[in-house]
Image: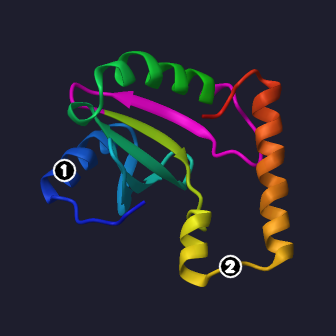
Amino acid sequence: MARAPVRSSQAKVVSNILEKHGYQLGQYLGKGAYAIVWEAYFKKWRTNVAVKVLMKDKAEAEFLSKFLPREIQVWKGLKHPNLINFYQSIETTNRVYIMLELAPGGEVMDKIRMKGACDERTAGKWFEQLCQGMAYIHSKGVVHR
């Protein structure tokens, strides 16, 4: 995800909603077409999570009404060590907040961009983990697009 500055007014709105649900807003992690991703601290579990904040005004209506609810429902039923875990979703008038397991190492592509090609052993390990995760979701009848 490309890093870009976030307006402080957005951060305040996100922080207020998260506080009401037991989270403390942390650092900005990145941005996509529909969403901004933040790190947050979940006080109840004493752990950091990733919070994907989807802005409804930037997303297509069909995405919000059909795809997103189905994706969340599927995500709730998936538990595997090579998948990012879903914790919770919160919907407000203007946003959908999706709380996910935080991958503290970041995205694989970011590592490759920063350090260049990885050694064969590391690539093999990552590929094996990818295959295990994909085999699991396929066993649950889920096809990743």
Q: Is residue 51 above or below residue 114?
A: above
Which image quadrant is residue 73 in? top right
Which percent across, then down, holds residue 83? 69, 45
Which percent across, then down, holds residue 67? 46, 22
119 or 85: which is nearer to us? Answer: 119
Q: Is residue 59 magenta?
A: no
Decide which of tag 1 and tag 2 comes sooner along the chain: 1
Which percent across, then down, holds residue 93? 22, 25
Task: Name the quarter where the C terminus is drawn.
Answer: top right
User: Callout 1: 10 Å neighbours few (<14), some, many (20+)?
Assistant: few
At 77% from the left and 47% from the top, the residue drawn is: 81
At 15% from the left and 59% from the top, the residue drawn is: 8
Instruction: Quickly name the residue at label 2.
Output: 117
Q: What element carries label 2?
A: loop
Q: What element carries label 1?
A: helix
At 75% from the left and 21% from the top, the residue drawn is: 141
Report whether 9 appears left or right of 104. Answer: left
Q: In this view, does 28 lie above or below 43?
A: below
Instruction: Quickly name the residue at label 1.
Output: 10
Amino acid type of the residue tagged 2 in the rendering = Ala
Report the span colored magenta: 76-95
Report whether 7 appears left or right of 144. Answer: left
Which image quadrant is residue 13 in? top left
- The residue furthest left is 9
6 or 23: which is nearer to us? Answer: 6
CA separation, marks 1 and 2? 37 Å
Question: For the image shown, how many numbered marks are present on the structure?
Answer: 2
Which percent across, then down, holds residue 5? 23, 65
Task: Name the quarter where the N terminus is drawn.
Answer: bottom left
81 or 26: which is nearer to us? Answer: 81
Q: In this view, does 117 lie above or below 104?
A: below
Amino acid type of the residue tagged 1 in the rendering = Gln
